Amino acid sequence: MPTHLKNLDDSTTLFGRLRAVCVDEWTAYCNHEFVRCIGDATLSVECFRHYLQQDYLFLIHFSRAWAIAVYKAETLSDMRAAASTLDAILNYEMKLHVKYCSGWGLKEKEMENLTEARANMAYTRYVLERGLAGDVLDLHVALAPCVIGYAEIGSSLANSPTTKLEGNPYREWIEMYAGEEFQNVARAAVGDLDALAASRLGPGRFESLAKTFRQATSLEIGFWDMGLNMEF
């Protein structure tokens, strides 16, 4: 494993410390009913399609957040790293998402014109606000529940004895987030948090970061609620 990739369950990392003080919210997020229903294949197709549509809109704002990361970066290397992530989301991940959605009968043009759900707006605007109001560490902490959380959820589902893979219409989704490529993205995100914290985590800063992490995780729970209940 490259040295910049850190284990998701390492309690000594900044991410590990944040997860430890927000354990109730993190558990509710990673073990949400929406997630469990994906695992046992009981989630309705309509709920999953609604989630996919809103996730497409989420990726647009996710890209904007990484654009802020470029602006907020204090070194050229950090700017390049953020720009590389932005490029990957806009020109690779979005295409993959659109292709995946097409298998569920969803067309990109139609998704572009969808009404954005309130839970989606609340989450994405919060991340953007933290990026604008704070520094690049605040932004990365706000993004962490999404990037790292999906990796933990994917791995947990793939290794759970209650997960049904054979005949599960959501198997590809599970395997995508459980796969080594996405797991490495999440491990790198854990390492990035530590690298950013090395020069920014002064006395009293952790409490503020924990508040951001807890709020972002709570908004992730709201995103699952939105998908499960088909809310707008």
Image (tube, rainbow, N blue to C red):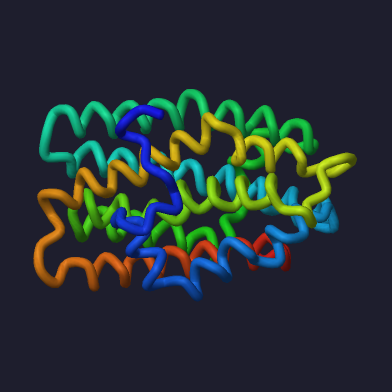
**Where the C terminus falls, by quadrant?**
bottom right
Taking depth in this image into account, of 31 and 220 the one nearest to the observer is 31
Identified at 63% across, 35% down, the residue is 176
In the rendered view, tell whether residue 30 sits above or below residue 147. below
The picture places residue 31, in percent across and down from the top left corner, at: 63, 64
The picture places residue 78, in percent across and down from the top left corner, at: 20, 33
Taking depth in this image into account, of 143 and 148 the one nearest to the observer is 148
Question: Which quadrant holds residue 2?
Answer: top left
The answer to whether 58 appears left or right of 216 in the picture is right
In the rendered view, tell whether residue 49 sits above or below residue 226. above
Identified at 44% across, 36% down, the residue is 185
In the image, farthest residue toward the bottom: 24
The picture places residue 128, in percent across and down from the top left corner, at: 33, 54
Identified at 26% across, 42% down, the residue is 69
Question: Which quadrant holds residue 223?
Answer: bottom right
The picture places residue 226, in percent across and down from the top left corner, at: 64, 64
In the rendered view, tell whether residue 208 sits above or below residue 220. below
Question: Which quadrant holds residue 84?
Answer: top left
In the image, farthest residue toward the right: 167
**Where the N terminus falls, by quadrant?**
top left
Identified at 60% across, 40% down, the residue is 177
What number of labels is visible? 0
The answer to whether 152 appears left or right of 6 in the picture is right
The answer to whether 203 appears left or right of 196 in the picture is left
